């Protein structure tokens, strides 16, 4: 059913024409291989060792000569041949069982369709091959299938021929003119409908754009298509990058381990990252689709045209591409809100990874299973590192650097050092010290103190940096930390920045480069004592501390001209208040929240001129996960009670203010649904307020919430009402809403994912029992990664009080699911281990209970390398 033709090109292996064909589950390939430099002189040719796993070898032929069994050697992960010349043609037939491939790596079946996921090392599960990213080939692929069941046959590049066979079968041949590593190979065969559009590139070429989905999803592709066209335009405008093939395809599949995959010309997406319709997807889901479509499209240059030499360089393409998609989203939506969302996510999750047993540098220096290193550190921290480079080069300098990078390395497989070198050369900068961000793990701490000297009008910032030890790295050298900052006067205005020893003023905002373990920056000529606004826009992924008083934070929350830092001050104030309350709670004294926090919120609610999306962000209390991350040893019970108690106290104290704004927004969003930024912002604040108002719901509020649930014409409002009801004490309304929702949306798997998640995240007593019951629901399926994430993942990662219940039943439950998934889908099993690996963060009663479950997994027979790596490292 599949015939591939590839052209092996590499520093060690060159050739052309690998051609594979076979029938259902059968793959055969042949190709011309050239081993450069080999065979000259008298040195014997080295053996050729091809990667291959879980494939049944049917035949091998060298230059048309079938090989006998003694001519080659096969083991569980390779095929070794002994070619007698440096150039030869190799033909290999294998048989595989895509229908039994529950790991979703290689060629597998999702519903009625065949599809592939080859990154990082999935191609070797299709056929024997040099499965490494620096071996680049030109692929030609022929698919042969039953026409009735699989009318659509796709692969990378251009369709060059197709036709009919006897007995209802048909075939299609695709040719990709660009040499590529096997991880970018893809094929799809299925019964799909097509949504088509086109894009005219900056040089005037017309590109055929296609999104393939199952027919019932036809109406849900418009947003992905719009996002794709905007991404293509943006990459031309901001990076000068034009698309290179004549066709660009996206296929949506329901069973997918990650978000999506950037296969050349044929992106394969988790349906959750393509499908979006106001009726079924929330505003957040719309934003995610836009970001993932952009991310995969941007990979065409940052990943495909220029790829990675080896998997240690993964952040070369991922960090850079996450940075690119974040900037795209910032340009399309509110820049400040996007930054707030990303920083919130990074601090709650990547910081925890950096502080845990799996901590690794952005460029890891060892791994057992590369799939375990598609991490928040490689992706999100990697993007922060690229953002710092952007800050240090400036937008123009950064563009010069990336132009040089793309030009110099087009068609090559390169390293993070090559990327840095291009930026250095284009800007005349030296990033030798900066590169420590790639090699040293852990989140640096930046401790800053201010010193005001009234007599001289000078203000000094004393900066001290350090970085905690991480596995295998006890000592760290100082990082280069770009510290974006301003000084504010007593009116909140930015003061002119004149650094002592510099002749030119720095204007009213500057970036200080902190490069030493200890360093002082002195500003002169100040008329009054300033209040510093530090690390604006989160200019470096560090833990900043500055001895602000609560009054200082209130001042910054109200007056900092920088929107991001206003939010940050508000967050820091809330963190400070909650940390104080945790201590009070532990001492058994009554919880009385700081009135200043309430008054900050009151003034935010009073100011109708503010962006509602920003107000929503500021009203959102820091998450339990973030408070856990900040604590040395987290008292999860106290954290939960304090946070819930504070939410209630805020709802009570600000009830009138919240009601007023909520009513105003009700009117503002009335009328037909709109997806505009303004409408999204209003819904965000309106629903944040609904959450608060329902904490202390009088009958009219409950009725309003039920009405919103029933009458909403969009999923954002419907889901927000469902969340409020599910977390309320109103059992009858809650059960009615859940039942109605399931009834209405049972045919929509992605909507049912939301239904599972809302319940998994409900922290009311009995959470584990509810989750266990939901596992038996007909819409649940352990083989579908989206379902696992929606129910089990959401419970273990977000419902901290439910998961960490004192008797350890949450841990046992998770371990059992990990053990089941270890056989079915090791990648997903390994991801699920994360909450257990964080055992050191919890109290002495919980630690042994968590470790017990890790040990239980550890001794499992048939433990996958994926799970073994994570569990063994966490027990070290
Ligand atoms: N390169 C893909 C992306 O970030 C992710 C592929 C992940 N694959 C895996 N096996 N972990 O867009
Ligand atoms: Zn990516």
Image (cartoon, rainbow, N blue to C red):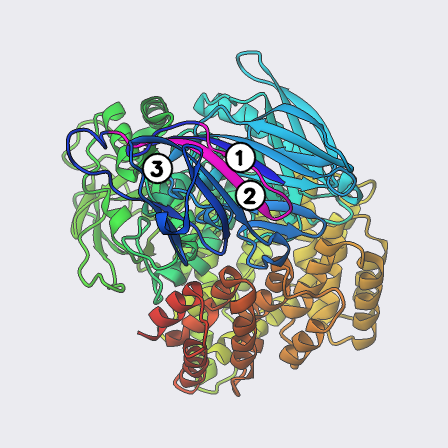
Mark 3 touching mark 2, by CB under 8 A?
Answer: no
Ligand 1 is within 8 Å of the C-beta of the residue at disc 1 = no
Q: Can residue 876 be seen in this view?
A: yes
Ligand 1 is within 8 Å of the C-beta of the residue at disc 2 = no
Q: In this view, does 588 lie above or below 467?
A: below
Q: What element carries label 3?
A: loop
Instruction: Return the residue at label 2.
Output: 27
Q: Give the range drawn in magenta.
A: 17-36
Question: In the drawing, does residue 244 fall left or right of residue 69?
Answer: right
Question: In the drawing, does residue 399 fall left or right of residue 3?
Answer: left
Q: In this view, does 565 lie above or below 290?
A: below
Instruction: Return the residue at label 1.
Output: 4
When asked about the image quadrant of residue 145, the answer is top right
Which percent across, then down, holds residue 288?
60, 45
Q: Residue at x 84, y 58 (%)?
A: 744
In space, the residues marked 3 and 1 are separated at their CA atoms by 19 Å
């Amino acid at each position: 059913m599949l015939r591939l033709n590839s052209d092996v090109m590499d520093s060690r292996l060159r050739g052309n024409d690998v051609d594979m064909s076979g029938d259902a589950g059968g793959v055969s390939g042949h190709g011309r291989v050239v081993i450069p430099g080999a065979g000259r002189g008298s040195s014997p040719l080295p053996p050729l060792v091809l990667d291959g796993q879980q494939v049944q070898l049917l035949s091998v032929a060298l230059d048309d000569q079938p090989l006998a069994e003694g001519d080659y050697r096969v083991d569980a992960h390779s095929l070794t041949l002994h070619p007698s010349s440096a150039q030869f043609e190799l033909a290999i037939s294998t048989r595989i069982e895509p229908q039994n491939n529950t790991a979703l790596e290689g060629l597998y079946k999702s519903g009625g369709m065949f599809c592939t996921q080859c990154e990082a090392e999935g191609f070797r599960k299709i056929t024997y091959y040099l499965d490494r990213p620096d071996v680049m080939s030109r692929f030609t692929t022929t698919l042969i299938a039953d026409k009735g069941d699989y009318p659509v046959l796709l692969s990378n590049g251009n369709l060059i021929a197709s036709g009919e066979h006897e007995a209802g079968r048909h075939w299609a041949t695709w040719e990709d003119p660009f040499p590529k590593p096997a991880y970018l190979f893809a094929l799809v065969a299925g019964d799909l409908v097509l949504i088509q559009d086109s894009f005219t590139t900056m040089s005037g070429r017309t590109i055929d754009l296609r999104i393939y989905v199952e027919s019932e999803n036809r109406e849900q592709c418009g947003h992905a298509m719009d996002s794709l066209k905007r991404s293509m335009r943006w990459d031309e405008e901001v990076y000068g990058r034009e698309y290179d093939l004549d066709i660009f395809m996206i296929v949506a599949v329901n069973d997918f381990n990650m978000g999506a995959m950037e296969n050349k010309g044929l992106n394969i997406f988790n349906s959750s990252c393509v499908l979006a319709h106001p009726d079924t997807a929330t505003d957040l889901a719309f934003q995610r689709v836009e970001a993932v479509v952009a991310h995969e499209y941007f990979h065409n240059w940052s990943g495909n045209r220029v790829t990675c030499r080896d998997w240690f360089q993964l952040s070369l393409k991922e960090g850079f591409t996450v940075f690119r998609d974040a900037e795209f989203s910032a340009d399309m939506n509110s820049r400040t809100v996007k930054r707030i969302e990303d920083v919130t996510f990074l601090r709650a999750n990547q910081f925890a990874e950096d502080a845990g047993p799996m901590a690794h540098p952005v460029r890891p220096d060892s791994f057992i299973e590369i799939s375990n290193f598609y991490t928040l550190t490689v992706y999100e921290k990697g993007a922060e590192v690229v953002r710092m480079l952007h800050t240090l080069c400036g937008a123009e300098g950064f563009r010069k650097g990336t132009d040089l990078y793309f030009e110099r390395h087009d068609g090559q497989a390169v390293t993070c050092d090559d990327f840095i070198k291009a930026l250095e050369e284009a800007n005349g900068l030296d990033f030798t010290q900066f590169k420590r961000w790639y090699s040293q793990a852990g989140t640096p701490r930046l401790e800053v103190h201010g010193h005001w000297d009234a007599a001289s009008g000078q203000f000094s910032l004393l900066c001290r940096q350090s970085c905690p030890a991480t596995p295998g790295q006890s000592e760290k050298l100082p990082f280069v930390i770009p510290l974006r900052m301003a000084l504010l006067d007593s009116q909140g205005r930015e003061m002119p920045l004149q650094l002592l020893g510099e002749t030119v003023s720095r204007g009213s905002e500057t970036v200080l480069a902190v490069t030493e373990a200890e360093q002082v920056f002195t500003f002169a000529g100040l008329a009054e004592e300033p209040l510093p606004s530090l690390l604006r826009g989160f200019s470096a992924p560090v833990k900043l501390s500055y001895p602000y008083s609560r009054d200082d934070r209130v001042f910054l929350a109200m007056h900092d001209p920088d929107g991001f830092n206003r939010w940050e001050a508000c967050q820091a104030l809330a963190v400070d208040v909650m940390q104080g309350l945790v201590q009070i709670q532990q001492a058994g004294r009554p919880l009385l929240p700081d009135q200043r926090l309430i008054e900050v919120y009151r003034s935010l609610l009073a100011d109708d001129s503010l962006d509602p999306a920003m107000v929503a962000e500021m009203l959102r209390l820091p998450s339990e996960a973030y408070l856990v991350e900040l604590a040395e040893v987290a008292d999860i019970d106290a954290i939960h009670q304090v946070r819930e108690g504070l939410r209630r106290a805020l709802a009570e104290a600000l009830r009138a203010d919240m009601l007023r704004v909520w009513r105003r927004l009700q009117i503002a969003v009335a009328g037909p649904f709109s997806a505009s930024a303004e409408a999204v912002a209003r819904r965000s604040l309106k629903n944040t307020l609904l959450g608060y108002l329902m904490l202390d719901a009088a009958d009219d509020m409950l009725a309003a919430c039920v009405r919103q649930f029933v009458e909403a014409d969009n999923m954002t409002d419907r889901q927000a009402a469902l969340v409020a009801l599910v977390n309320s004490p109103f059992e009858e309304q809650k059960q009615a809403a859940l039942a109605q929702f399931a009834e209405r949306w049972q045919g929509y798997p992605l909507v049912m994912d939301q239904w599972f998640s809302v319940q998994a995240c409900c922290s009311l007593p009995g959470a584990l029992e509810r989750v266990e019951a939901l596992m038996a629901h007909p819409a649940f399926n352990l083989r579908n990664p989206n379902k696992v994430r929606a129910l089990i993942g959401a419970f273990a990662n977000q419902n901290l009080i439910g998961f960490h219940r004192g008797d350890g039943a949450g841990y046992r439950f998770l371990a059992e699911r990990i053990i089941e998934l270890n056989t079915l889908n090791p990648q997903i099993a390994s991801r699920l281990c994360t909450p257990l690996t964080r055992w050191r963060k919890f109290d002495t009663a919980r630690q042994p209970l968590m470790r017990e479950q890790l040990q239980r997994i550890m001794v499992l027979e048939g433990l996958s390398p994926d799970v073994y790596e994570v569990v063994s490292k966490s027990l070290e």
